[in-house]
Image (tube, helix red, strand yellow):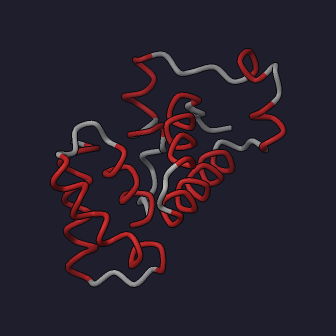
Amino acid sequence: MSTFNRSALVKVLEVLDSGHAGEALAAAKLASTMVRQAGLTWDEVLAPSIATAVEEPAPADRSVGSGPFGYRRDRELSAHEQFFMVLLSPNTPNEIKRTLRDWEPRVLDGEMTPQETQDLRSLYQNFVAG
């Protein structure tokens, strides 16, 4: 089982309350991806015993095996994942978050231009992975 970061999942699930339907849907998809990649089911995540069965990694472990929001470093994140990590990051300036809102429909539909994909990758590196 890969590393499971409960606090990152909580942050993503808080977006479900968004007034933007697309943002809420994307958060739900990101949450499901996080659970699946941790090798868990939603029943396991919601079980009362999850706190003892799946523990947060020690700070030293985070630098070795996992990236931002508990994601593994050994794979390329999708544009969708990068988008929401940039949007949710406290390091991302508000003016950039406002710009990203215009991109949301294209990100969710997978219709980003190559330039937007490159710009998103750069934003992710600067404000999340940096």
Residue 105 vs 126, above or below: the answer is below
Residue 80 image point, x, y percent? 44, 64
Quadrant of the image occupied by residue 52: top right
Residue 19 image point, x, y percent? 49, 56
Q: Who is closer to the viewer here, 54 or 30?
A: 30
- Please name the residue shown 31% across and 51% down the image: 86
**Total count of labels:** 0
In the rendered structure, the answer to whether residue 90 lies left or right of residue 6 reads: left
- Please name the residue shown 54% across and 57% down the image: 24
Quadrant containing the C terminus is: top left
Quadrant of the image occupied by residue 49: top right
Quadrant containing the N terminus is: top right
Q: Residue furthest front?
A: 19
In the rendered structure, the answer to whether residue 66 lies left or right of residue 101 reads: right
Quadrant of the image occupied by residue 75: bottom left
- Please name the residue shown 17% across and 48% down the image: 126
- Please name the residue shown 37% across and 57% down the image: 82
Residue 45 image point, x, y percent? 74, 34
Residue 58 vs 63, above or below: the answer is above
Residue 114 image point, x, y percent? 26, 82
Residue 80 vs 61, above or below: the answer is below
Q: Who is closer to the viewer here, 23 or 89?
A: 23
Q: Who is closer to the viewer here, 15 or 71?
A: 15
Residue 37 vs 78, above or below: the answer is above
